[in-house]
Amino acid sequence: MKRDKLAERLLGVFLTELDDQLRTMNAVLLALEANPTDSEQLKTLFRVAHTLKGAARAAGAPVIEEACHRLETFLAQARDGAIGLTPRHFDLLFGAADALADAGAHLRAGTQLEPSRLAALVESLASLPPESAQVETAFAASENIQRHERSNGLVRVPAEKLDTLLSSGGDLLVTSGRFVSRAAALDALLETVTRGATEWRHTSRSVRLALDRAGATPGPARALTRMDDHLLRTVQDVRHLSRAAREDARTVVRVAEDVLHHLRSVRMRPVSEAWEALPRVVRDLASTTGKEVDLELRGGDVEADRAVLDGLREALLQLVRNAVDHGIEPAGARAKTGKPRRGRITVAAARSGDRLVLTVSDDGTGLDIPAIRVSLERRGIAAPAADAEVGRLMLETNVSTREEVTTISGRGIGLDIVRTAVARIRGTAAVTWEAGRGTSFKLECPPTLATLRVLIVRVASQSLAIPTMHVERLLRVKPNEIKQAEGQSVLPTANGPVPLVALARLLPPLVERPDAGALLVVLLRVGERRLGAVVDEAVTEQELVVRPLDFSLDRPSQVSGAALLATGEIALVLDPARLLTVALGGDVDVGVTLGDASREAAAVPRILVVDDSLTTRTLEESVLQAAGYDVLTAVDGSDAWRLLQEHGCDLIVADVEMPRMDGFELCEAVRKSTRWKTLPVVLVTAMETPEHRARGLDAGADAYIGKSSFDQQYLLDTIRDLLG
């Protein structure tokens, strides 16, 4: 390897190690500041300085090497009891961490280190006494420890390489979908060939009889026999090919999903990495503002994609800064209101279904709504009457309630940083507060940007993908259920009326299709805002690899990306937050166009859908409602048994694996019932082994459908056959 290439590589390795060691250094300093006599923390800090000294020497950064050497000397004296650490010393040590970070930035930018803060650190440390022999001994010991710690089996891989692999994994997933489509096409071909062979057998039998009666020579009869044999072999060959294609498709799908899963898991990191800097930030800001603040971090082991953590890091940093500066009161003011002198900021992470949820809460003053209204009006923005809407608008505009500009606040860009960072990771932000008691910001986003779980719908022959994290449910709405409020179409729900709009109106040039029958509505939720979007068809739910769109393209802002479907069709990925903003902003005529015909639906069979998965339950409900059935839903077998007694039904479609009462037990209960023993039951499940299928049929199921080969039309055909 050439010398300059080697130097460049060593420098890159050093900068990565510098970042890791500085994270450790800041964490140890915070713990040590709380307990300055903690010998273990002092040893750890000493090892950090010694490790960086050796790494800087190898990377050819003598200024950093010299600074770490002097820092090491100082820490050795503190460790040996020659120096008692004081607040002034901690200021120096925190300054050293900042100076080292600043030096790393200079090295990345390719600029000289002398003008940096590190040069000043070297000068301040130069006056310290020289190191003792004990220090040299400690160097050797710490070097042995470090060698041991480095043998951790970790391999550093550039993020760009992981992104490339993940993109290839996405292509593999799309290809696996095509395998499934080809297998389905072979199944259809088998059905056609089998039907043709059956018809030919009937025809050839009639022809033979006619030939026998006519006294024909054996030649034509032998030709018919050969044709029969050819058709039989063709059917057998196609059957074997179809079976092999199904098995290959299952294998390819499983392998593709495994590869994608493992690639995603490589990119997943604990959320705690996004808030590593927060304890130091709170400590410094509290010192600057003269406040007393404690920071509590929860759920740091929840994992998210590296790219998601990058976006969250900016948003969390700004929200915590705001909490210290705007939210938490000075200790004296808190004491007067009966609060503890020390304020508390809590940052918590959790997974909720397919969403990552982070909250940043403080026990401060809450939002100053009158001041926010004044700031909005100063910018020429009409402040809403409802306080909750003022809070939402605050998140969407650059609002500052500070009259003066400081290093912390006053330019109104803080929440803009939060909004931009959250939007970049396809997330949403919401705020709640209680006057005098505190404020809570809630951030929601997908845990990974590499793939996205979506509901595929169709509008005017265009496939659209809606992230499932914002899909509350699917509904079939009759025209007479739609109400009018203030000139807009709304849908009454248990949680209040929801504005209703044809999705085509939000996505020109798509054209709305009037429908005289029931409308298919996707109920969207972003934060506390809800919208009913009317679509033509709900196709399926699946995981897609989303590709960014060229921003130079003329496209609606409601479209955030695109994905390639297994059929080769391009699906546009929608941004639900922008959809709601456009729909509820007053620039679009919110409503739907109904056909002229309006008629009450005739009595239709009632089907009870039982599944503990909300997504599966909703999708099956939509499919059956679209086919004209009246549908009841239950979350497990026990709930289904109760609904069956209360409302009755004409057929049950049930999952097998469910809590309380599974599908087998439900089927057995139905068969033992005097009232319902003849009720048709269809089990739709991922448990597809011959043993499970036999158990389902033994329990009394009329049909057993595997989810891996699930097909909407096959389910509907099965139901129609069972209902006669």
Image: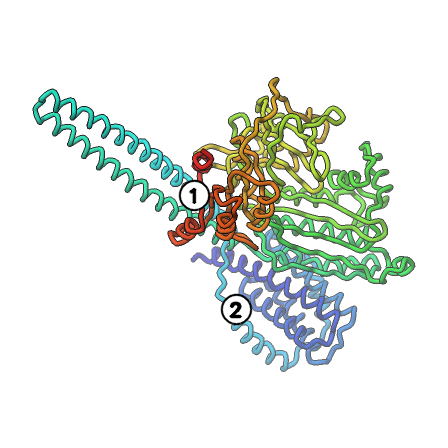
Task: Please state which amino acid type lies under the numbered disc 2.
Answer: Arg
Task: Please state which amino acid type lies under the numbered disc 1.
Answer: Ala
Front position in the image: 36 or 185: 185
Front position in the image: 225 or 406: 225
Q: Position of residue 380 (x, y in %)?
A: 82, 32
Q: Which residue is mark 2?
A: 150
User: Which residue is the extreme one toward the top?
Assistant: 596
User: Which residue is the extreme one toward the left?
Assistant: 217
Q: Secondary structure at mark 1?
A: strand
Q: Residue at x 56, y 46 (%)?
A: 449
Front position in the image: 494 or 159: 494
Q: Position of residue 508 (x, y in %)?
A: 60, 25
Q: Position of residue 362 (x, y in %)?
A: 78, 55
Q: Do we see residue 548 in this rendering?
A: no
> Along the polypeptide, which appears first: circle 1 or circle 2?
2
Q: Quadrant of residue 268?
A: bottom right
- Above-or-below relation of 240 to 21: above
In this picture, residue 585 sits left or right of residue 15 = right
Q: Secondary structure at mark 2?
A: helix
Front position in the image: 68 or 80: 80
Cα–Cα gap, marks 1 and 2: 58 Å
Q: Residue at x 36, y 43 (%)?
A: 246
Q: Which residue is mark 1?
A: 703
Q: Quadrant of residue 291?
A: bottom right
Crowd around label 1: few <14 · some 14–19 · many ≥20 (10 Å): some
Q: Marks 1 and 2: which is nearer the front?
A: 1
Q: Residue at x 63, y 48 (%)?
A: 311
User: Which residue is the extreme one toward the front?
Assistant: 674
Q: Quadrant of residue 84?
A: bottom right
In this picture, residue 662 sits left or right of residue 576 = left
- Above-or-below relation of 48 to 659: below
